[in-house]
Image (cartoon, helix red, strand yellow):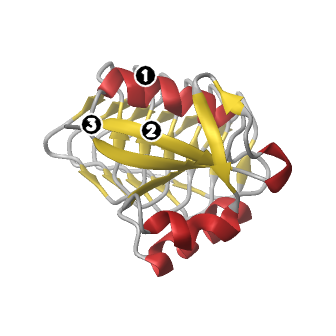
Amino acid sequence: MKEKIILIGGGGHCRSVIDVIECEGRFEIYGIVDVKDKIGKKIFEYEIIGSDEDLYMLFNKVKNALITVGHIYDNSRRVELFKLCEEIGFIMPNVISPFAYVSKYASLGKGNVIMHYAVVNAGAKIGNNCIINTRALIEHDVVVEDHCHISTGAIVNGGTVVRENTFLGSNSVSKEYTEVSGFIKAGSIVK
């Protein structure tokens, strides 16, 4: 029997995560938490069952949660929700697409999502509450700190450190053994 999971945030990122969860096949989506005026609506076949205020009550029914609010310009909401889930006691598993590759020599914190065709190579360390988006490449010995979004097609070359709360835009490339922080726009080269 599959474990149940609650998704927190019902926007576009949530839709992508639903697809990964369904492909992975480990969890049954119990429902989605979003803003009050969306309660009762559905995303695909999954109902929005409550708002943030309902998380304490929902914890009595479901122990797993995943933050599915996106992160582009500001991730403060993702961070706030992650801390709230930790305070409540939710287990925040990593969700990994079966079409992604995560080396057995890589390490992952908790509450991360590794999207379709992403690669996390040997010696890489991913913190907590990160999005490693579709076709992103995390090379050997990279450190991605907590609450980062490595966007679609981004390449993080070997030995790079991606500092906490960083957004690395689509098709960005970091030079090897560099430090990346802040908001990096799509197509950038970080030296």
Q: Residues within 10 Å of mark 3 (few under 14, many from 20)?
A: many
Which residue shows up at 42% across the image and 68% down it?
A: 60
Residue type, numbered disc 3: Asn
Q: CA distance from mark 1 to mark 3?
A: 15 Å
Q: Earlier in the sequence, mark 1 or mark 3?
A: 1
Q: Residues within 10 Å of mark 1 (few under 14, many from 20)?
A: many
Residue 12 at x, y percent in the picture: 70, 31
Residue type, numbered disc 1: His
Circle 3 sits on which residue? 121
Say above or below: 87 vs 32.
below
Judging from the image, what secondary structure is the residue with disc 1 in?
loop
Q: Earlier in the sequence, mark 1 or mark 2?
A: 2
Label of residue 82 in the image? none
Which residue shows up at 75% across the image and 46% down it?
A: 39
Which residue shows up at 43% across the image and 61% down it?
A: 128
**Res 15 → quadrant:** top right
Circle 2 sits on which residue? 29
Q: CA distance from mark 2 to mark 3?
A: 29 Å
